[in-house]
Amino acid sequence: MGPLQRVVGAVGVNETGTPRVFHPGDIPARPHHPLARSARIVTPESTGSQRLFAGMFWNDPGASGGWSFRGDDPDEGQMVDGIPHLGAHDEKYLCLSGRVRVTWDEGEFEFGANDVVYFAAGRTYLTEVVGDDPVQVFYVIAPAPGWMVPLGAAAEAT
């Protein structure tokens, strides 16, 4: 058996069901906010799968944002009040560095480095970086959203 195919730049469609190795450093981070960058790694375009979507993001101190995972959302597929409305999806985070405060329908909580966070569908979440350290997070969304916020030109990941 040979080694798994390593993907550089996450370009090209992979046939569904074929394992792949992605190195986040090979995929350029692109801005989605003045203080934030994203690298979309496991996508329908890079894997052929609609079952999940994964990537990394880097938020600088002072960054804030959010998203809506509400089903039957009349605003699904667009930005409203500065946040993307993605439809009914679950999301998981693995925080690699920094600290984030999350405000949601029932209150707020914080997470930081080495925490795994589950965000349930049916909610709207608002986030802000807490403190002076940048945040780095690996995330997985399931199922893969049909629309994501467009990214700007490639930037260097930190």
Image (tube, rainbow, N blue to C red):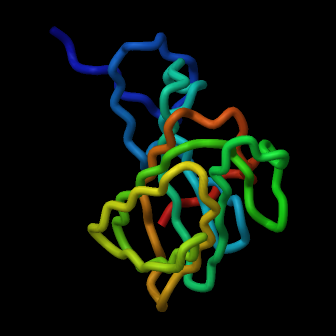
Residue 13: % across, % down: 56, 17
Q: Nearer the viewer, residue 111 or 9?
A: 111
Seen in the image, is 61 located left or right of residue 83? left
Q: Which picture quadrant has residue 144?
A: top right
Residue 31: % across, % down: 68, 59
Which residue shows up at 42% across the image and 47% down it?
A: 24
Which residue shows up at 70% across the image and 59% down it?
A: 32
Seen in the image, is 153 located left or right of residue 137? right
Measured along the vertical axis of the image, is residue 150 above or below residue 105? Answer: above
Seen in the image, is 26 located left or right of residue 125? left
Measured along the vertical axis of the image, is residue 147 above or below residue 103? Answer: above
Measured along the vertical axis of the image, is residue 67 above or below residue 109? Answer: above
Which residue shows up at 62% across the image and 67% down it?
A: 36
Residue 102: % across, % down: 52, 75
Measured along the vertical axis of the image, is residue 98 above or below residue 4? Answer: below
Q: Nearer the viewer, residue 99 or 30?
A: 99
Q: Which picture quadrant has residue 95?
A: bottom left
Count of marks overlaid on the render: 0
Which residue shows up at 58% across the image and 55% down it?
A: 38
| Residue found at the far left of this picture | 1
Residue 78: % across, % down: 82, 48
Q: Quadrant of the N terminus?
A: top left
